Amino acid sequence: MTGFSPQPTEVGDQRAEALRAGLADVRERVARACDAAGRDPAEVTVIVVTKFFPASDVRRLAALGVRDMGENRDQEASAKFADVKADTAGLRLHFIGQIQTNKAASVASYADVVHTVDRLKLVTALDRGAAAADRRLRVLVQVDLDPARPAATLGAVATAAASAGPARGGADPADVGGLVAAVQASAALDLLGVMAVAPLGVDPGPAFGRLADVSRAVRAVVPDATWISAGMSGDLEVAIRHGATHLRVGTAILGSRPTLR
Ligand SMILES: *Cc1c(COP(=O)(O)O)cnc(C)c1O
């Protein structure tokens, strides 16, 4: 299968129809939020998060014209995308999960973009892995936006965290400058910008506002690092209002994920 144009899905493929409807719904939300924020929707890329879902869904999404897919686990991503990437032109795999240092070389061998660089050790490991695979790797620094949690919200946070939300992670904003310098000094990594997951159980607006501030500080040093990866199914409008350039959307397009895998 080659080419970028959306292709007709097979007649009677109800899953493909559901994905098409989910995509249309999300694109409509993006358009409306951009309108409200006075932004051009062309500045905002939807990365479709396919974690937990099978390679057949990735192929359906590719046939619907999606080129940016997100995954959060090394084993699952490498297995799922090995075939799909080989026969689907232009697919970009975004790695959006926490990376153990011993998995970094593997991720660096196939990911197109890594959103979750949050410590110096990982910069070194990804750089080595990309160099060993003879490729360049584009990365974002993940920022921890958790405010000091007031005691009153701890219960709510713990409950939300237990309900299969994405793993936290991210660098303290004070450490972002050091990470940016390390990426700049690396041999095989290119800095695209910053990424964050909104803290659970609190208004995401102020958090995304802090991310915009961190992005400004990073761009003062690396003007090309313009990506702001923020916003998921539940908070993409708020992220767009605060300048997100890349949304990571799973549930709103693919439906709820199974809780076990
Ligand atoms: C799973 C995940 C998403 C997608 O979340 P939805 O709420 O399903 O849209 C986005 N970002 C990260 C880091 C994730 O792990």
Image (cartoon, rainbow, N blue to C red):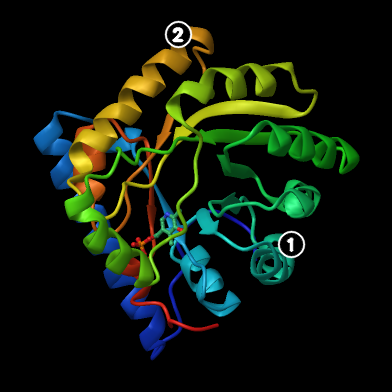
Does residue 252 appear anywhere in the picture?
no
Residue nearest the viewer, comparing 63 with 198 = 198
Q: Quadrant of residue 261?
A: bottom right
* Mark 1 / mark 2, whichever is N-terminal: 1
The amino acid type, in three-letter code, at marker 1 is: Ala
The amino acid type, in three-letter code, at marker 2 is: Ala
Q: Is residue 126 left or right of residue 52?
A: right
Q: Is residue 124 left or right of residue 69?
A: right
Determine the secondary structure under disc 2.
helix
Q: Which mark is residue 166?
A: none
Q: What percent of the width, then of the height, locates residue 191?
A: 60, 26
Q: Which mark is residue 220?
A: 2
| Residue for point 27% across, 44% down | 149
Does residue 51 appear anywhere in the picture?
yes
Q: Which mark is residue 86?
A: 1
Determine the secondary structure under disc 1.
helix
Q: Quadrant of residue 84?
A: bottom right
How far apart are the alpha carbons under marks 1 and 2? Answer: 38 Å
Vertical side of 99 occupied by 22: above or below: below
Q: What percent of the width, then of the height, locates residue 222?
A: 53, 13
